[in-house]
Image (spheres, rainbow, N blue to C red):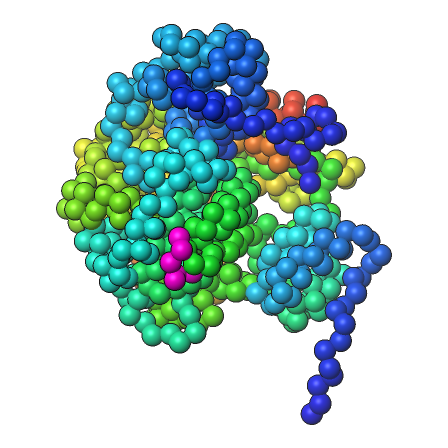
Amino acid sequence: MTVAPVEAPPSPPREDKRWRQVDVKIRRLGARPDGLIEVLHTVQEVFGFLDDDALGYVSEALGVPPSRVLGVATFYSHFVRKPQGLHTCVVCMGTACYINGASAIFERLHGTLGIDAGGTTPDGRVSLLRARCLGACSMAPAVVVDDEVHGRMSPDGIEQMLEAL
Amino acid sequence: MTEMGGATPARRRRQEPLIPDGPVRASADVCQAAGCLSMQSDAVFESLCERVTACGLTDVAVRRVGCLGLCAAGPLVAVPERERLFDHVTAGDDASLDAVVTALSGGEGGRPIASDPFFSHQVKVVLEHCGRIDPERVEDYVAAGGYEALTKVVTTMTPAEVLAEVTHSGLRGRGGAGYPTGLKWTTVAKADSADGKYVVCNGDEGDPGAFMDRSVLESSPQQVLEGMAIAGYAVGASHGYVYVRAEYPLAVKRLTTAIRQAERAGLLGQRVADSSFSFEVQLRIGAGAFVCGEETALIASIEGGRGTPRPRPPYPAASGLWGKPTLINNVETFSSVAAIINRGAAWYQAIGTGRSRGTKVFALAGSVVNTGLIEVPLGLSLREIVFDIGGGLPGGGRFKAVQTGGPSGGCMPEELLDMPVSYESLAEAGSIMGSGGMIVMDQGTCMVDVAKFFMDFCREESCGKCVPCRVGTTQMHGLLDRITRGLASREDLAELEDLAGMVRETSLCGLGQGAPNPVFSTLRYFRDEYLAHIDDRVCPAGVCKIEPAEAVAPVAEASR
């Protein structure tokens, strides 16, 4: 059985300059299969989520079977498979936040935004997420709005904050 | 990527710390750990720099430092020369800034650190440099005595001597299980491997309610790297990995900086401190899976796969990363090593109680006044931790329980407050030391609801590989849910206990084996609360939403 000689690296699925950032990461990791999670992190940072085209490209570039790439992308809760809203709102549900009223905060958002955890409002404005623990326990309950941590939050406080975005 | 607090489109130049050329009369150390940063302590730092410059104080420093511990009262500024701590300092509050400047120029003000019970009961070994150095400047760490231990080890000690020192110190794994560190190191050192061994630092701090490792990584990252390099020398490894969870972006950033700076300074990489020993460290970022804190799952994740555990043996010490002998320790364990080498095993051994030697860092949170990060000698009582250091419960709340060990731990009631905290005593009380999260709960917390909370966590975080954990946690959660809704019978409770025992005995890894612990411990100490939900259909704490009486009969019917 003959194996085709190693070809030039695969080309990105779309014309988009942002793929260069992904390619740099792949090169820096030596295009090795064990760099899969690191590369997926970069793809998500650059594009905001992991679509099928991106997974296919990563699979080819690292020489990892597509099934394994999909397996990894769906195993870890940090990776998302659909586009996120303009703003993200992450409610921490760690122990300290939970006993200090995180559920009430989440329920309020669930009610006013009309979406579940992992959902995005129909107008694409806000995505609502739940976190296991952000390690911001000393400021419980904590909510992260667009990468900024806000401690000692209340249902009213977060509602006002989201309105002001 | 969004810039933190980036109101102006053009990136502002980062304010450099003010460090006088000559002798320093006093310095204002502004906390820049995640807690205080979320309260805009970076703006406090800039305002203080401006003020000090405007006042013409040329012999005082303004520096960025790591976690000062008392997160509840942030943003924090310390003036170490005056032994004063200033709390709630805000950039917009002139009075709070003036108070710091007054102290810098010799005046009074602030909280005295030495007599404050929050600080006076603590013994800092792991946190020795936290809040005292700039975590993004290797020169600060070196000036504080950093890398002296590594230099001593690679130039004057044999690996066997290092192993003996760590063994004699009595240090045990601070990730939770408490396995003797010296024994683990010796096992890896003895393992033969022609093509290399690995040292892995477990920074996948997934326990909800725990933030010790985050604070250490954000405040003194070089200390962790130094401990790893010493371990590498002792066990014969020249490659290391630090695995940090993605939820800690600041820790990732500071570690990246620390690795680069240490390599440039010749303290990591090829020929460490001009010796023949080489040690390279790479960073791996998790992606949100609690199970990756389990060592075999963590290895699978570093290798780029799904983070599922595998049966042990073989233990990673024999066959770990890429099948090579691998030493895995937690952030806090590695952070204890340099001090042990510097001050000697006997010194470390003298701290602690029974078979639990040394100090332990705890993250104090929940219904307690002084939430924050503390380090105490093992053997201190829960009462001293919660009431003396923690300052008791806020707003006159009454103590109900303290939870340790996260989803694998337990809740300890008031009767056990005088119990000394050690690996053995906690296990006897039905909990575990765990990584160090300590959540204080008041009378407004329902213990059945807490058990349900942890079971929900385990159910969602179960990797699904073994049946007892995957199915058992879901079934236990279902039963707990019925209890909290007032729909359960005594038979349901018996079934819950049966199932909990089965899951504990038969699960593949620590996640499943530990998952029933919150149920067992709340049943042991708060059984009356379970019975109130079942027999009287009442939640004594008023947390659970009991279904109306008419809903009970049809549901009970349907479940048959």
Residue A76 sits in quarter: bottom right
Point out residue B476 in the picture as x, y percentages from the top left corner: 42, 52
Residue at image x 52%, y 26%?
A: B17
Q: Is residue B277 magenta?
A: yes
Point out residue B307 in the picture as x, y percentages from the top left corner: 50, 61
- The answer, for residue B405, to whether it is visible in the render is no
Query: Can you name the residue that lies furthest to the right here?
Result: A15
Q: Is residue B14 magenta?
A: no
Write down the region rendered in magenta.
B273-279
Residue at image x 70%, y 67%?
A: A61
Residue at image x 46%, y 11%?
A: B101
Residue B369 versus residue B254: which sits nearer the camera? Answer: B254
- The answer, for residue B377, to whether it is visible in the render is yes
Residue A1 versus residue A53: which sits nearer the camera? Answer: A1
Residue A16 versus residue A53: which sits nearer the camera? Answer: A16
Residue B473 versus residue A44: which sits nearer the camera? Answer: A44
Q: Quadrant of the N terminus of chain B?
A: top right
Q: Main secondary structure of the magenta part?
A: loop
Query: Can you name the residue that lies furthest to the bottom here?
Result: A1
Point out residue A21 in the picture as x, y percentages from the top left corner: 72, 53
Q: Is residue A57 above or below residue B136?
A: below
Residue at image x 35%, y 71%?
A: B318
Residue B528 sits in quarter: top left
Position of B131 with respect to B94 (left or right) is: left
Point out residue B53 in the picture as x, y percentages from the top left corner: 54, 14
Residue A150 sits in quarter: top right
Q: Is residue B390 above or below residue B517?
A: above
